[in-house]
Image: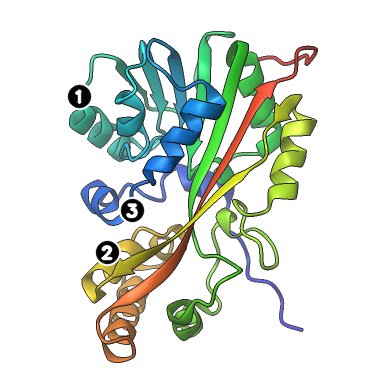
């Protein structure tokens, strides 16, 4: 039996996505509106609260969060290139961008009503990170972990199958998870993390939808994947060329990728002993 491919180090996530912030922002799909509706209903997203966002990137979640009129939003983004892009494009007086890792950022305990991490939490050591989040939350505060997950184990994925050979031998993102389940779709593991960190979790919500791409869109999107950015430039170009060629020749210039938006929400247990 073949050995499982090696995973990228967690630390790689802090610099994996900043080479071309504008392309990342344009190529990555937005979160469905139902994502924010769920956070309103289940995590207390509303006007006037204090929000912490972990792994803000270019602002794909930051900007929708700001539309809900928080009193302030502290966005942690360790990649200086992404942090600068976010500060420039969001340009909101309520927004503070902190260019450090979550582990190193100095944050005042019990100072947030909501902590959000969008397609980024798999780069952290889950239980210690959640324990720190618990210490940062005010009474009745909530945490929301969301992902735009590229794939769905329950649906056929022809383009993924047709291109899998291009990735053979490459390291994989920590978001891939184990077996058939990605980190985001492994609900049992995510709920166990919440429990171990002293949170009371809600039932996860999974929004299933389809992303349509032309060959240019395929190239732009896949160039943002961590396991692609980790490749040497020549090998990266060869891979992206191969993806675009398959999209053109085998799929007639139109690729559909299965998407799953995973939404996990939880509140700190009243008797949990957590520290920021």
Residue 253 in the image: state x and y as whole percent.
Answer: 24, 82
Residue position marked by numbered label 3 in the rendering? 29
Residue 239 in the image: state x and y as whole percent.
Answer: 36, 77
Q: Viewer-nearest of labels 1 and 3?
A: 3
Disc 1 element = loop
Residue 47 in the image: state x and y as whole percent.
Answer: 37, 14
Q: Report, in whole angstroms, how far the alpha carbon at label 2 lies from the one at label 3.
A: 11 Å
105 or 152: nearer the viewer? 152
| Tags 2 and 3 touching, CB below 8 Å | no
Q: Earlier in the sequence, mark 1 or mark 3?
A: 3
The label number, if any, that marks residue 91 in the structure image = 1
Q: Viewer-nearest of labels 2 and 3?
A: 3
Q: Identify the image quadrant of residue 203.
A: top right
Task: Please identify the quadrant where the N terminus is shown.
Answer: bottom right
The label number, if any, that marks residue 220 in the structure image = 2
Classify residue 56 as left or right of residue 86: right
């Amino acid at each position: 039996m073949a050995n499982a491919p090696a995973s990228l180090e967690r630390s790689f996530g802090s610099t994996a996505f900043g080479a071309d912030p504008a392309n990342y922002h344009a190529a990555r799909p937005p979160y469905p509106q139902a994502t924010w509706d769920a956070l309103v209903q289940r995590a207390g997203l509303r006007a006037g609260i204090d929000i912490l966002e972990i792994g803000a990137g270019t602002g794909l979640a930051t900007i929708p969060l700001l539309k809900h009129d928080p009193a302030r939003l502290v966005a942690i983004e360790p990649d200086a290139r992404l942090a600068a892009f976010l500060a420039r494009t969001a340009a909101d007086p309520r927004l503070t961008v902190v260019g450090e890792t979550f582990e190193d950022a100095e944050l005042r305990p019990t100072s947030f009503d909501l902590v959000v991490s969008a397609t980024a939490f798999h780069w952290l050591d889950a239980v210690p990170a959640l324990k720190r989040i618990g210490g940062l939350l005010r009474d009745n505060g909530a945490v929301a972990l969301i992902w735009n997950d590229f794939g769905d184990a329950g649906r056929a994925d022809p383009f993924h199958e047709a291109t899998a050979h291009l990735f053979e031998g490459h390291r994989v993102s920590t978001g891939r998870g184990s077996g058939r389940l990605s980190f985001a779709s492994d609900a049992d593991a995510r709920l166990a993390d919440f429990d171990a960190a002293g949170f009371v979790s809600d039932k996860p919500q999974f929004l299933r939808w389809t992303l349509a791409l032309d060959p240019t869109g395929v190239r732009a999107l896949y160039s943002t994947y961590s396991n692609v950015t980790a490749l040497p430039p020549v090998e990266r170009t060869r891979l992206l060329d191969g993806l675009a060629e398959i999209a053109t020749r085998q799929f007639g210039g139109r690729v559909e990728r299965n998407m799953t938006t995973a939404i996990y929400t939880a509140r700190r247990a009243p008797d949990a002993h957590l520290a920021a």
